Image: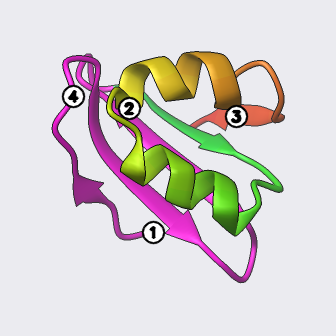
Amino acid sequence: MKRRMVESASVRSVGYSTSSRTLEVEFVNGSVYQYFDVPQPTYAGLMAAPSIGNFVNTKIKPYYEFAEI
């Protein structure tokens, strides 16, 4: 999945697949996680958030299944 770089202290890049509704997050420590069945509006909210790291911690991690890749 192609990711794009973001301005964040904790997140390096973010990618999203509309067909599979998979969100991919690369953290600055090098770990990469995929979050499953994420609606497109949630992805849009993430990309528009003033703090991407905070959005991931409060709106993504608690609600979506994930796997480290």
Give the CA distance from mark 4 to mark 1.
20 Å
Secondary structure state at the residue bearing disc 2: helix
Q: Residue at x 78, y 18 (%)?
A: 62
Q: Residue at x 59, y 73 (%)?
A: 17
Quadrant in the picture for residue 9: top left
Q: Which quarter shows the C terminus?
A: top right
Pick whichever of labels 4 and 1 is earlier in the sequence: 1
Q: Is residue 24 left or right of residue 4?
A: right
Residue 38 location (% of width, % of height): 75, 54
Pick whichever of labels 1 and 2 is earlier in the sequence: 1
Residue under pointer 2: 52
Residue under pointer 1: 1
Q: Are marks 3 and 1 in contact (CB under 8 Å)?
A: no
* Residue 47 shown in magenta: no
Pick whichever of labels 2 and 3 is earlier in the sequence: 2
Give the CA distance from mark 3 to mark 4.
21 Å
* Pick the front one: 63 or 1: 63
Residue 48 location (% of width, % of height): 39, 50
Pick whichever of labels 2 and 4 is earlier in the sequence: 4
Residue under pointer 4: 8
Q: In this picture, is 40 found above or below 48?
A: below
For marks 4 and 1, give the one nearer the viewer. 4
For marks 3 and 4, give the one nearer the viewer. 4
Pick whichever of labels 3 and 1 is earlier in the sequence: 1
Q: Are marks 2 and 4 in contact (CB under 8 Å)?
A: yes
From which residue to which does the magenta span run? 1-30
Q: Which quarter shows the N terminus?
A: bottom left
Residue under pointer 3: 67
